[in-house]
Image: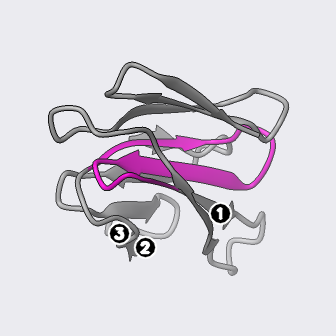
Amino acid sequence: MAVHPAGDNLLVCSYDRKCIWFDLELSSRPYQTLRLHGGAVRSVSFHRRYPLFASGGDDDNIVVSHGMVYNDLLQNPLLVPLKSLAAGARAADLNVLELRWHPAQPWLAAACADGTLRLYA
């Protein structure tokens, strides 16, 4: 689970291959369900400065997406998948365990089940 830096949007990942975006100012029901992965989604992370978020799981992919949230309450968030990155090798049917963005740069660090830490710049 990750909270958008503005604080009014929430992204929840689940083991049933979905990432669910909640716009907390709009409704308590999900705004959009993203089916970007072929396996369990174990980690999701927002970038603090850029309109980016990433999700990773057991399907050997990390999906980087554009998630623009507008200040205008009449305009809905814009969610666009941008790039699918290859993750590390599988270990015990697990792959990406944790994702973190660099605080200032659009660099993504991924901790994988094979014991590696990968940096995508």
Q: Are marks 1 and 3 in contact (CB under 8 Å)?
A: no
Decide which of tag 1 and tag 3 comes sooner along the chain. 3
Image quadrant where one finds the N terminus: top left
Q: Secondary structure at mark 3?
A: loop
Which residue bears the numbered disc 1? 67
Disc 1 marks a residue whose amino acid type is Gly
Which residue bears the numbered disc 3? 30
Which residue is pictured at 62% across the width and 74% down the height?
80
Which residue is pictured at 43% across the width and 61% down the height?
22
Residue numbers of the magenta segment: 41-62
Q: Are marks 3 and 2 in contact (CB under 8 Å)?
A: yes
Q: Secondary structure at mark 1?
A: strand
Image quadrant where one finds the C terminus: top right
Between 1 and 81, the one nearer to me in the picture: 81
Which residue is pictured at 75% across the width and 67% down the height?
70
**Separation of disc 1 and disc 3 at Cα?**
15 Å
Apparent side of residue 70 relative to residue 96 in the rendered image (left or right) = right
- The vertical placement of 117 against 38, above or below, is above
Q: For the residue carrying disc 1, how many other residues have a C-alpha within 10 Å: few (<14), some (14-19), or many (20+)?
A: many
Which residue bears the numbered disc 2? 31
Q: Is residue 54 magenta?
A: yes
Which residue is farthest right?
104
Q: Secondary structure at mark 2?
A: loop
Q: For the residue carrying disc 3, how many other residues have a C-alpha within 10 Å: few (<14), some (14-19), or many (20+)?
A: some
Disc 2 marks a residue whose amino acid type is Tyr
Mark nearer the viewer, 1 or 2: 1
**Separation of disc 1 and disc 2 at Cα?**
13 Å
Disc 3 marks a residue whose amino acid type is Pro
Between 27 and 81, the one nearer to me in the picture: 81
**Separation of disc 3 and disc 2 at Cα?**
4 Å
